Image (cartoon, rainbow, N blue to C red):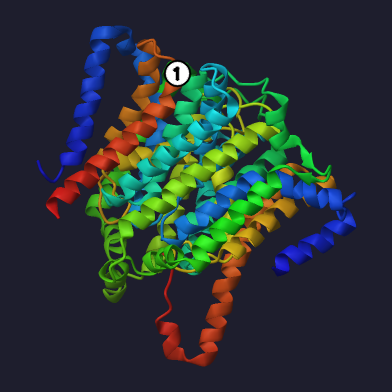
Amino acid sequence: MKRHFRELSVAATLALLLLLLAFTAPTFFAKQQLLTTLTTAAPLLIAACGIALVVIARQIDISIGSQFAVCSIVAGLLAKAGLPMPVVALGAVTCGAFLGAFNGALIAGLGLPSIVVTLATMVTWREALRWWREGEFVKDLPEGFQWFGFGQAGGQVTILVGAALVFALVVFTMRHLAVGRFVYAVGSDRESARLAGLRPQWRTFSVFVALGGLVGFAALLNAIRFADVDPKTGTGLEMQAIGAAVVGGVAISGGRGNLWGVLWGVLLLSCIGPALVFLKIPPQWEKAIQGAIILLAVAAEGWKNRKQS
Amino acid sequence: MAALIIECLIFTRTGANFATRENALEIMKLSVEIGLLALVMTPVILTGGIDLSVGSLLGLCAICFGKFWRDAGISWPMAAALTLGIGALAGRMNALLITRLRLPALIVTLGSLSLFRGLAEAITRGVDNFTGFPTHFLAFGQGYYAGVIPAQVPVFAAVAIMVWLLVHRTTFGRSFRAIGFAPEGARYAGLPVERRIMLAYVLSGMIAALAAVIYVARVGQAKADAGTGYELLAITSVVLGGTSIFGGVGTVHGTLLGVGVLAVLKNGLTLSDQPSELAGILTGVLLIVVLAGEVVLKRISERKTSPRAALFTRKGG
């Protein structure tokens, strides 16, 4: 119980919020609304899992919002070019992986600080995209793009199933596969990991590539919810994903955190927006409340650690 | 330094009216807000910390300033003073979380970035903006002394000198670098680490508030999205100026050069009729090239001196 204190307390907070909603605004739980809330949260979950990997490895990546936007546009353009959806999906993931590899090469290869590198790539990708698209949406997409061609209900289920599968895959990898455990090792003590023969540079590099691929997949899951692709999508994603991960117990100092906590964190942060609508609170408070929750979560962790030391 | 000179040369060729005195003053006028943020970001980064929330704090302070002046009917000098207080309070909040609870500055300021921006949006309900400020206030942002020097430049110069003196000529400044270089060592040496860090963040908050007031005077209105992205430009200026993101190493004059490089870049591109996005792209590229170049040059020189020295290279992350 103590080991999973953070994950349980986030889950408990989520439960409290849901309870509050059950009494004051039960329409939140209407099937369609619930489905919409979850499908909006699904891309964030995937992105947050990816960022959790990077943070566990003691790095950070604030460029994922821009990566998300680029991959979304790429997915749209591939679909417009007439390629079948599986190829579009692969394209989005590969695009993300390439962007991640670029970050990884600079960070792992040259040893540049991840905050500065991803700061630079965030600005560069976002501005380059804006220059290229000039704010123009990707329109006139083929029929099979939105909802994978299954119609809204079928598409939403597909998104949820896809997200659940990838989530399960990542959880399994991090818990049971050596490659996952090595990420924890590199994050908690890089020098020891190196001495143990783990080659932290490659691990760090691959973590950024993995993040990129996951962000690409998240971008795809998000893009197919609409009939056109907005180049401004993904703005603020890095804050939400990092926030969800941190709320879910992933420590910024690296080496700690599990993905179930990330799940609860994502659900909690994603439910705030719709909850505000149903509780008739002006939606502009969402950002402030999210920021407050992040600070509270981190402060609680810090306070707990302080009492122990 | 070299980058700045090269930039100036390029833009003199490609830009209309670039190499004129009016333009130089315009550049200074427009870069004051970010310059202020970068100046106070320097001590923060020197201590090994970071403050991602300054841009959002600027927005929040701008809104507070507007609200004090318009809705509470307070005279604008009082409103400005109150706003500075809010900035200091915000900085203090950040500092408390970072020092008392030993939380990483990155996460704390990431959270407060959301919080401040969110508060600004919530207070204005996303639409409100404050306009119609009295002309003698607007003169601070839009007026010129002797018809030539933009009004905010002397303020900026004063702050720049103050921060430079603080960092380079006082014991406070030396302690910042000591804390960034080796926090535990600084503690054992008897430095009041927490108080110094708090000073850095409170100063950062207050100057962000000052920048907010200048911004409102220059733009003539206070909106919730003021200062979006400014923290990135400030950090970029500091890092370009040679300060290590890990702390312990860096100079204020370096930061000023960094601010100059970015300001000239933006201005030169605009005058050369290039799209504004190019400025962002080149900024990112420049940052990477400068940092990567440093690492590569260091590796080459180390390989020359001794193979053993190369083994103990400190890598980032």
Query: Is residue A46 found left or right of B71 in the rendered image?
Result: left
Assign the C terminus of chain A to one quadrant of the image.
Answer: bottom left
Residue B166 rendering spot, x and y as whole percentages: 50, 61
How packed mark 1 is, by other alpha carbons closer than 10 Å (few <14, some 14-19, many 20 or more), is: some
Residue B111 rendering spot, x and y as whole percentages: 39, 39
Identify the residue position indicated by label 1 in the image: A283
Which image quarter: residue A14? top left
Q: Is mark 1 on a helix, strand or loop?
A: loop
Query: Is residue A158 found left or right of B82 in the rendered image?
Result: left
Q: Residue at x 64, y 36 (%)?
A: B215
Q: Is residue A48 visible?
A: no
User: Foreground residue, B64 or B94?
Assistant: B64
Q: In the rendered image of this protein, does residue A154 appear above or below residue B289?
A: above
Callout 1: chain: A
Residue A21 rendering spot, x and y as whole percentages: 27, 13
Which image quarter: residue A275? top left
Q: In the rendered image of this protein, does residue A14 appear above or below residue A190?
A: above
Instruction: Check disc 1 and give the amino acid type.
Output: Pro
Q: In the rendered image of this protein, does residue B298 appear above or below residue B262?
A: below
User: Foreground residue, A34 or B206?
Assistant: B206
User: Foreground residue, A4 or B121?
Assistant: B121
